[in-house]
Amino acid sequence: MSWVAVAVTGYTLVSGALQADGEQQMGRVRQKFANYNAALELAQALEVANTMRRQGRQLIAGIDSTYAGAGVRTGQDTAAYMVDSANEAIEYDASQAILEGARKANQLRAQGTLSRTESDTRAQAIRQDSYANAFQYGYGVVQRGQRAGWFTRQPQASTGPSLSIRDSADQARMRRMNARFSQPSSVRIGNG
């Protein structure tokens, strides 16, 4: 297997991992943004409710002063009923504003959670795709290598220069020994 194949496979895996991490980080950012918007929505609803209550108190004070100016005793019969009705209506409207704000806030939080879940799912799919692509590429290289005989041929001796100084020294020693033993030598017995 060539080093290019190893590099391409490694690049595929690293690229997929980086893409997946980026997608997950974007999901977290979207969720934080949605939670922040939810908090703003709820705070705005509380502010609207407080404004309604403050204006309601002013309205009730105006009703009381109108009845007092007309000579009607406040806090009894019709005047008390009108003030209580106004208080109930004001509190109902303020509660509805808070409920609407809470509903919108919950919807924003749910969208943020959904966005993060979708990002995590996409990140997992990206990782799986990068694993599959790396495996497919590696498998293709192995198949091409098998067709080319990389795994079935016996290793052949190199006819080119050796790979290291030690190899060339060993080869030179072997050549000298082969040359010495391949030439016939005369055998001398005795003195002379």
Image (spheres, rainbow, N blue to C red):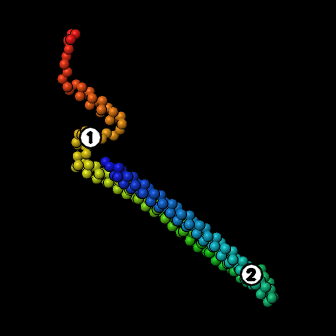
Q: Which mark is residue 27?
A: none
**Residue 123 at x, y percent in the picture:** 44, 59
Q: Is 86 above or below relative to 140?
A: below
Q: Label 1: few (<14), some or many (≥20) within 10 Å?
A: few
Q: Amino acid at mark 2?
A: Gln
Q: Residue at x 74, y 81 (%)?
A: 58
Residue closer to the observer: 177 or 16: 177
Camera sees residue 81: no
Label 2, label 1: how far apart the Cα atoms are:
102 Å
Q: Residue at x 31, y 54 (%)?
A: 136
Task: Give the total number of marks visible in the rendering.
Answer: 2
Q: Which mark is residue 158?
A: 1
Residue at the spot of label 2: 58
Q: Earlier in the sequence, mark 2 or mark 1?
A: 2
Q: Is residue 184 left or right of residue 59?
A: left
Q: Is residue 43 left or right of residue 22?
A: right
Q: Label 2: few (<14), some or many (≥20) within 10 Å?
A: few
- For the residues bearing labels 2 and 1, Cβ distance under 8 angstroms: no
Which secondary structure, mark 2?
helix
Please tell me whether mark 2 or mark 1 is closer to you in this view.
1
**Residue that extends furthest to the front in the rendered view of this protein:** 192
Which secondary structure, mark 1?
loop
**Residue 120 at x, y percent in the picture:** 46, 59
Q: Residue at x 24, y 25 (%)?
A: 180
